[in-house]
Amino acid sequence: MLDLALGLMLFVSALLSLHSKDTMKSGVFFIIFGFLSGLIWVRLEAPDVALVEIILGSAITGLLIFKLVKGSKQKDLKAFTFTRLWAGFISFLILIFMLFHLTTIERQDRIASLVFENLHKSGVDSAVNAVLLNFRGYDTLLEVGVITLAIFGLLSLGLKREAYYWDNPLLKGFSRLLLPFIVFFSLYITYLGTFSVGGAFQGGALLAGGLVIFALAGQALPLKASIIYIFMMAGLGVFSLIGLLYALLGYGFLTYPLELSTISIMIIELSIWISTAFLLYTAYRGKL
Amino acid sequence: MAFEILSIAFMFIGAIFLLAGSIGLIRLKDTYSRLHALTKADVLGFGFIVLSCILSTDLLSHWIKLLLVWLLAISYSALVGYALANRKKRYA
Amino acid sequence: MMDLVYGLLLFLLVLNLLLGLVRVFRGPELVDSMMASLLLGTGGTALLLAFFKITKEAYYINLALGFALLAGVVGVAFAIIILGKSKDGI
């Protein structure tokens, strides 16, 4: 009953976000779609995905959408009929594929049991993080690389970006009070990733939200541009350095020895945390 | 047992206040009065729900986190209400 | 007995979300839609806390704390970016 109501609301908000006349209103509906799907992930007992969806899918994407809509000249974006038909066709194919998969699925040994068998070899207690940073570490390394390259591409466009801020004492005081809490809690989430729900990407996105509200009050971070560059590159740099180090020592690329795996995963998580935060913050501002 | 009953009662009170807030959001006529319904009734209901959760657990770490959630909710509510009303009056 | 009580509770909280969605849809101005989505933020946090009370799983509190930390940022950003005028500077 509860799940049915949530699913129906998700469907309605997705439909309205596609079909409303005003671009801004579809943005608001998209934010609502984000956190309703977060609630649905909670109901499906996937709290890690729910945390990502709540923090990134609704809050950070919402901030980016606001800036995009305010900056764009054209107020009502009309997609061409051909584009819409093409998108509908692709989605229909995916739907058919999923339905086919859903009806033919069988209970059998899947890869999950393999993960739980080998969990003690990974150095962390959380299955999600073991898969993400140890078993398929190569994949995660490339994902971090993609984010970093995307943000540097954005910076290299060199467009003139407008800044929006409100010079208000209440907002200033509040953001200064909030920032330490957010830094502490995002570190806590990152640390929690090694044995429970949480992780470096979630913590970094949370910190990015705190930095954005700091910037909205009209304050700049007391950091030089070069330090921000170093923070942005930290994830990719540390991750590939550790991988290369183990390759040179003879273990193989990104293959941690058992006794060192916990500490190396911790270092990688910290670097991904700081670089995700500063990358998303730079993506919001559009400049350094 | 008494704590359990009290906790469930608080959660019902909180849910009813939240519902009152959203009924106010539907029924009231203009933006400022809707903002009033949103930022007062809602926060009261949320406080009751946090109180009910505090009664139902006995770990210190949970208490600290729940209190933090409550403090964040009330301060954000005040800040958002002020910001929306002020900016709307000045620019729209 | 307990199932019925908790079911009624969850029903009330989800009804709250539904009413908020109605205001987002009807809102004559953009500000009304955004306010209703903030109501959905509070209601969603309340729903997470209710799940915590029912199942006693500790991670729901972390989820609720993450939700509470960033729900207001969207509202403040809306007020400043959309309702305000752009300025040069920082």
Image (tube, grey):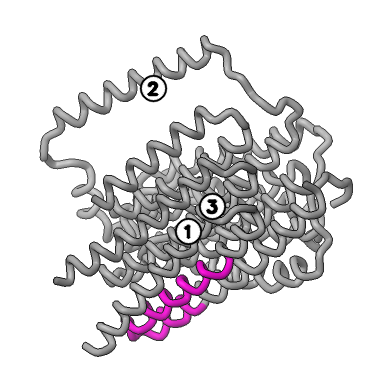
Kind of residue sitting beneath label 3: Ala
Assess disc 3: are there few (<14), some (14-19) or many (≥20) residues with their C-alpha within 10 Å of its C-alpha. many
* Vertical order, C72 against A72 (above or below): below
Identify residue type, mark 1: Ser
Name the residue carrying label 2: A91
At mark 1, the secondary structure is helix
Q: Quadrant of residue A270?
A: bottom right
Q: Nearer the viewer, mark 2 or mark 1?
A: 1
Amino acid carrying label 2: it is Ser
Q: Report the Cα–Cα distance between label 1 and label 3.
A: 8 Å
What secondary structure is found at the residue carrying circle 2? helix
- Location of mark 3 (residue): C36
- Residue at the spot of label 1: B22
Specify whether disc 2 shares its chain with disc 1. no
Against A106, residue A34 (above or below) is: below
Q: CA distance from mark 2 to mark 3?
A: 30 Å
- Residue at position x 58%, y 66% in the image: B39
